[in-house]
Amino acid sequence: MFDLDALQLARLQFGFTVSFHIVFPALTIGLASFLAVLEGAWLRTRKPVYLDLYHHWLKIFAVAFGMGVVSGLVMAYQFGTNWSEFSRFAGGVTGPLLAYEVLTAFFLEAGFLGVMLFGLNRVGPGLHFLSTMMVAVGTLVSATWILASNSWMHTPQGHAIVDGHVVPVDWLRVIFNPSFPYRLAHMVVAAFVATALVVAAAGALQLLRGRDSEPVRKMFTMALGMLLVAAPLQAFIGDLHGLNTLQHQPAKLAAIEGHWENHPGAGVPLILFGVPDMDAEATRHAIEIPRLGSLLLTHTWDGQFPGLKDFAPQDRPNAAVVFWTFRLMVGLGLLMIALALGGLWLRWRGRLFQSKPFLRFALWMGPSGLVAILAGWFTTEVGRQPWVVYGLMRTADAASPHSAESLGFTLALFVVVYLIVFGAGTGYGLRLIGQGPKPNEGLLLDPGGPGQPHQPMRPLSGAPERMDEIGGQGAVQGA
């Protein structure tokens, strides 16, 4: 397939499936906490606007949760099918960590999800709010275990290698490995930022359509408020994460910076743009700011850090990829901060809901948080290469012995099935978002009973509207 070998196809297949999967958990992490805030505000104030917003975003949460579970199962199976040597080598660490995620987070979410989706008219407001809180906590616990496992692969510690297998000897050191706190904070805040941008875009869409209502204004201002706090905080966490990467994965940091070699007595410039050339061992057409790289990464005017030439060619990550994915992430982050500050200024001027250029900006920025998450994920995972467990096992040694033909066929099958299934699910979710919150929406599902229809209580049942119904309503409202 396009002259790719089996290893490249296995990596591409895993990258494709994880790229689809990571979007949905990011939204469920952010939306679960947003729903908890909305229900808490409703219980405290009894203002219907919060309950209307809760019902509206609960439907989108149900769709994202359902698709996240399905995509996660597919991705997990690949550890055994495509990466069996990795599982054999490191399963003593990664297997229990994933099992802990199921035994804690997944069971917690599963235990309270049904009450959260369908139980407001059955269990009472207090218990229902507890269920919403537990689901929100469950999403954060899930992220904790997943990031602990992935971070250990980047900065492994707390283990011994016995007969060619990793054996955990100190679980606290395994879990709280050097990169774990930074990566967990970076991912969770990224989920909050991405969700805030989606909610802000949904509010901007309704305002641009002339549907100016209290729920629309409330969700728009809440989203911009979260963005005003979380986007600058994310930039600060990202700086700390970068310093941690310089300490533990200097080759990745050199690739991100497009930095090849140091010159005696000279500081390292910050390369804003350029074209890293792995064969020529240089970054061509570089636009740089002298000494700023030293200032940002060593906090000194003339400090230096390892360049890519300090590492053997076979130990260098692909700078041509991570150089640009990192800049895409940072560039979008700067636009997010600009959006938050622009919203603050317009709110102060009393024109937040009337400025159409700003509303269009907020609408176009809607998917930027998810794009930034993917760009950051590519940066950190491609930057780890050629290691699957940094310094312990190379990616080439981790793959299962499959042929390029079989991997090419399954990759093509994945692409077709994913585009159909998740394309339909994403389209359904976008239509629900475009529908907008309804005043006095009431409960999501008919409680059933004599003469009443019953619906299966599965996560996607939390969004009971049919696709054609949403389209029809949208056409009527648009007219």
Image (spheres, rainbow, N blue to C red):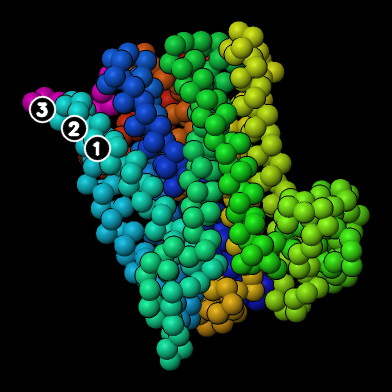
In the figure, residue 160 lies in which quadrant? bottom left
Residue 152's place in the image compared with 379, above or below, is: below
Residue 334's place in the image compared with 374, above or below, is: above
Q: Position of residue 344 (x, y in %)?
A: 61, 19
Q: Position of residue 412 (x, y in %)?
A: 56, 62
Q: Residues within 10 Å of mark 1 (few under 14, many from 20)?
A: many
Whether label 3 touches label 1, CB < 8 Å: no
Disc nearer the start of the sequence (2/3): 2
Q: Secondary structure at mark 3?
A: loop
Q: Which residue lies at the image location 59% right of the left edge and 77% below the top edge?
A: 391
Q: Which residue lies at the image location 52% right of the left edge and 25% below the top edge?
A: 225
- The magenta-colored residue range is 442-455
Amino acid type at circle 3 is: Gly
Q: Residues within 10 Å of mark 3 (few under 14, many from 20)?
A: few
Q: Which mark is residue 323?
A: none
Mark 1 sits on what residue?
Answer: 131
Mark 2 sits on what residue?
Answer: 127
Q: Secondary structure at mark 2?
A: helix
Mark 3 sits on what residue?
Answer: 449
Is residue 79 inside the magenta stretch? no
Amino acid type at circle 1 is: Ser
Q: From mark 1 to mark 2, how far is it between C-alphas?
A: 6 Å
Front label number (3 vs 1): 1
